[in-house]
Image (spheres, rainbow, N blue to C red):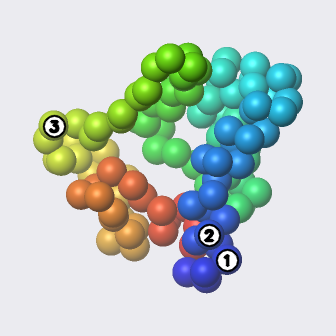
Amino acid sequence: MSENKLLAWLDFPNGLIERATKDENFRKKLMANPKAVMEREMGKLKKGAKFPDALEVKVIEQPENVFYLVLPAATNQIPDEESDMISDEWDVAAKGEVFVNHLVN
């Protein structure tokens, strides 16, 4: 994996947030259909990049007086039906919660 691709992927969420704060139309589309919008934007980093079909993607608006801390599921086990979607090529970080390599290679 090239360093440029990795850096681009790691900055991907921040780029979406920045764009959504500046472009109200993009924000509305992202809120209405986050999976499709994110896949379209991911495709700019890697042609054909897609989330697994079984993955639900959510975008939430954080009020100024609230701080969200997102924790992974209590079990770090990947359900059997999803394990087939994950190949040995994926770099798995943070006990399986982040799959970067597959999307940027």
Image side of residue 60 versus residue 82, left or right:
right
SS of the residue under disc 2: helix
**What residue is rendered at 51% in x and 27% in y?**
58
Marks 2 and 1: CB-CB under 8 Å?
yes
In terms of depth relative to the viewer, which is nearer, 92 or 47? 92
Q: Calculate the distance from the C-alpha at mark 3 to the C-alpha at mark 2.
A: 29 Å
- Closer to the chain start, of discs 3 and 2, is 2
**Up/down of 87 relative to 3, above or below:** above
Quadrant hosting residue 68: top left
Q: Measured from the top left, where is residue 14 in percent x and y?
A: 64, 48
Residue underneath mark 1: 4
x and y percentages locating residue 71 in the rendered image: 29, 37
Quadrant hosting residue 84: bottom left
Mark 3 secondary-structure assignment = loop
Q: Which mark is residue 74?
A: 3
Residue type pointed to by label 3? Ala
The circle on residue 7 is 2
